[in-house]
Amino acid sequence: EAGVTQFPSHSVIEKGQTVTLRCDPISGHDNLYWYRRVMGKEIKFLLHFVKESKQDESGMPNNRFLAERTGGTYSTLKVQPAELEDSGVYFCASSKRVGGAVHEQFFGPGTRLTVL
Amino acid sequence: GESVGLHLPTLSVQEGDNSIINCAYSNSASDYFIWYKQESGKGPQFIIDIRSNMDKRQGQRVTVLLNKTVKHLSLQIAATQPGDSAVYFCAEPLAAGNKLTFGGGTRVLVKP
């Protein structure tokens, strides 16, 4: 079974540009999460999809970040316009959805974003 | 606010020795914790978890201890190997959506 995949693995852009990150969850996983780790800090939650619906976007830092999950399969996270403080590693994770039980989240390898 | 944090940023350990990684949490109502391992170039990988009705849980070469009195948990790695070199995070799922709150991470460096 393929794991969570993310594209690209690295992205270097200039301040003010736009970048779109993609996450392909494990097939059949309804839950999809985005997290990020900025330099020297802990991994922080950004948002959570259940299928195509945004369940929780309380971690999104501002309106420069837009996440979508059309069709409930892969997800994209767009940053527009990018700022220096957006640099970091963006992780995607997915999990099964079975009632209210906690299910293990499987993480992708992350996308390292560098904003110059 | 609720937080899960780590005491030591870097732990250097001799191959074959045991490693202990510590984590503190602030919410006394927390009832479930997870340890993740993140190797270079990879995402966090589940190692072991523990519920608050337990004080100790063992896996393969790893043991997690939970002290609810002082709101502290630890991950012990027995006979540390070079493949154990990674950053280790404690984490706690919150709210109905199980979003994870992570500690700051401890880097374990295994010396040959």
Image (spheres, rainbow, N blue to C red):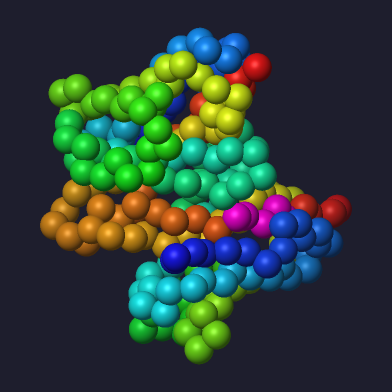
Q: Main secondary structure of the magenta part?
A: strand
A10 sits left or right of A102 in the view: right
Instruction: Name the quarter where the N terminus of chain A is drawn.
Output: top left
Q: Provide residue B36's location: percent of width, then percent of height.
A: 52, 55
Examine the image and state in which quarter residue A108 appears: top left
Above or below residue A18? Residue B41 is below
Seen from the viewer's position, the closer of residues B56 and B83 is: B56
Q: Which residues are magenta?
A: B104-108
In this view of the protein, can residue A78 be seen by the observer?
yes
A100 sits left or right of B30 in the view: left
Q: Provide residue B92's location: percent of width, then percent of height.
A: 42, 62
In this view of the protein, can residue B47 be seen by the observer?
no
Q: Residue at x 64, y 50 (%)?
A: B87
Seen from the viewer's position, the closer of residues A36 and B109 is: A36
Q: Residue at x 83, y 62 (%)?
A: B14
A51 magenta-colored? no
Above or below residue B42? Residue B102 is below
Q: Provide residue B9's location: percent of width, then percent of height.
A: 72, 57
Q: Residue at x 55, y 58 (%)?
A: B103
Q: Residue at x 62, y 64 (%)?
A: B6
B107 magenta-colored? yes
